[in-house]
Amino acid sequence: MDMVSAEQTSLDMALTQTGAKVTSIHGLLCFVRYYIDETELFYVYNINAKNQYYLQRVLPYPVGAGIFAKPGDIVEYIKNDIKQFENASNSSNFEEFIETTQRTHQTVHAIEEVFINYNVPPEKMQEIDTELSNITNILDDIKNKCVRIVVV
């Protein structure tokens, strides 16, 4: 058994012990599922040619988590992510949060589709930029005025 395969088996076991369902495809591409009530957290990671692990959360909305050198770092990242989602799921705004982040992700794709396939006039580009700035200002205002949640 080679080193990557042994690390993969160890990582799969550690994630399974957190309550996740892990599916490995030839030890190079792995799917990790975890449920918080009705909400599925779905992660995908793969091992690249440099024996590094690229992790991304796919559900409930896609977020690239980054590249990790050690399998234990993936476990820690996912465990922390799960804790944060467990805490967030107690919010009265949780469903709206999920819907908003999904719509935001769809908007990113729509912006890309428009700019790749259409000749966008400068005034429309400015309009989009202004609206995105408004959203950024709202988020900054929340960060400045609301109590930060620390999950341990």
Image (spheres, helix red, strand yellow):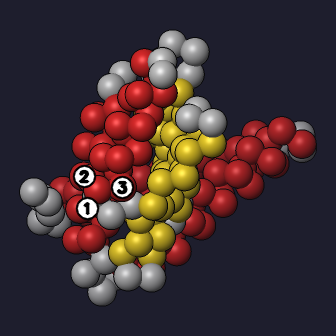
In percent of the image, x 83 and y 38: which residue is there?
116
Nearer to me, 114 or 61: 61
The answer to which of 95 and 136 lies nearer the viewer is 95
Q: CA distance from mark 2 to mark 1?
A: 6 Å
Q: Residue at x 41, y 52 (%)?
A: 136
Q: Which is in the foreground here, disc 1 or disc 3? A: 3
- Of tags 3 and 2, the one toward the viewer is 3
Judge by depth and name the residue closer to the eye, 152 or 75. Answer: 75
* Rendering coords of residue 59 (x, y %): 53, 61
Residue ID at (25%, 61%): 84
* As drawn, 138 above or below 28: below
- Residue 15 at x, y = what percent? 35, 50
Q: Find disc 3 in the rendering and name its residue.
A: 16
Decide: is 42 above or below 121: below
Taking 17 as reference, is 98 left or right?
Answer: right
Which labelled disc corresponds to residue 95? none
3 or 2: tag closer to the N-terminus: 3
Which mark, by number, is residue 84? 1
Quadrant of residue 104 in the image? bottom right
What is the crowding at mark 1: few (fewer than 14 residues within 10 Å), some, or many (at least 20)? some
The Cα atoms of the two marked residues, 1 and 3, are separated by 19 Å
Residue occupied by mark 2: 80
1 or 3: tag closer to the N-terminus: 3
- Secondary element at tag 2: helix
The disc labelled 2 sits on which kind of residue?
Asn
Residue at the bottom extreme, as displayed:
92
Instruction: Report the Cα–Cα distance between label 3 and label 2.
Output: 15 Å
**Residue most extreme to the top:** 50
Q: Are marks 1 and 3 in contact (CB under 8 Å)?
A: no
